[in-house]
Amino acid sequence: MVSRDEKSLQKVWAWLIAGMIAYIPANIYPMLLTSTLIERSESTIVGGVIELVQHGSIGIAAIVFIASVIIPIGKFIAVGYLAISVQRRSVASRHARHKAFEAVEFVGRWSMIDVFVVAILSALVQFDTIATINPGIAAVSFALSVIFTMLAAQSFDARLIWDANRTPSL
Amino acid sequence: MTAPLPPLNDLVACHQCDTLHAATDLPPGTRAYCQRCGVLLMTSQPAAIARILSLALTAFIMLLAAISFPFLTLDAGGFHNATSVIDAIMAFNDGLALPLAIAVGCFIVVIPLMRLGALIFALGPLVREQPGDARARIAFGIAERLRPWSMAEIFIVGVTVALIKVSGLAAVTIGPAFWAFTGVVLITVLKDTMICRYSIWEALDHRNT
């Protein structure tokens, strides 16, 4: 048992906003730099998903899309909503909110998939002039975004959800 | 509200929402969940400590193997490239991305190793029924704290995605380290479902008194 962290919500907001800011360049800049003999191409997160769909691997495209678009954005919304509802001392649907918090904590780590994919691809495809794949700057900001939102979820004190109808015992 | 509480040692607080429950001996094969928020409180496998320890040791050794053997090899147009897990980490080794190389290295190698090491350190003396010291409690606490940051299983899914992306480009051969790594992931999942935090903390506490 640990006593409640009074700055919990402040930390949550700080990490969450940092995560959202880092998510913007992660989508604008290229994730992968592919150069072959004939061409040089850059692909962003969404670009990579579209490429996979065109190759016909819908399942993999769906995994990447869920891991790197739906989960991060869903997390921003969920953590923000939880923090606001706690600030308002809401007592509505606390069980549902607790479940949401657990889901966020469990699922957030899976966003790192795309970073690992980039790492493996760029380690594997290194054939000097014929074909090379190198990580783009978006990989860094995407990883930062995931780490920041994980920290946001961890600094959220789930007990605050249940504290709403208690009078502070100061 | 005025009913007397049972002795402190028989109470267990939910680690998510602080609801107090009276701890009872569970019948075999059952699990206890928090009344309010539904978090798993304890499992009826207090004797599983020896099994958990052996699984942790197995995973530790397999992880060392997974780091040292070739992970994947790629053949395309007469070129041959063998990649180990270390190479995948070092893919980010230039310039701005260097901190990312360190982070990825921590997530897939250092933190899993630390967690397993801490668990072995904390549970080892328990199995031999030796009196330990407070460091065992700290080690178990660290192992629990690091749980979300150990991302070996996510790495394996990432590898699968990467394999499918490359498969059109070149012939990929899966090396022994891939299987070792998959084994580590499976054993870790098995170990985490077996573990009963309550009984381990109890055991660590009893030894100190």
Image (cartoon, coloured by chain):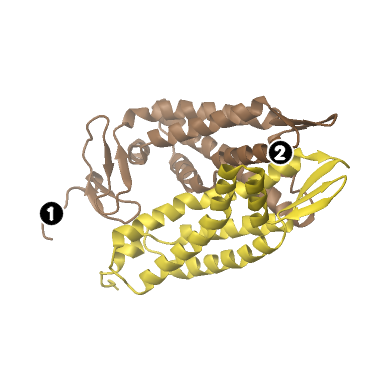
Chain on which label 2 sits: B
The chain shown in brown is which?
B
Give the colour of chain A: yellow
The image position of residue A96, as x and y in percent, is 32, 58
Up-down relation of residue B142 to residue B193 (above or below): below
SS at mark 2 in the image: helix
Tell me what residue is drawn at x 16 percent, y 52 percent.
Answer: B5
| Residue beneath disc 2 | B166
| Residue beneath disc 1 | B4
Question: B78 or A110: nearer the eye?
Answer: B78
Of circles 1 and 2, the one toward us is: 2
Mark 1 vs mark 2: tell me if same chain: yes
Q: Which amino acid, mark 2?
A: Val
Which label was assigned to residue A158?
none
The image position of residue A141, as x and y in percent, is 66, 59
Chain on which label 1 sits: B
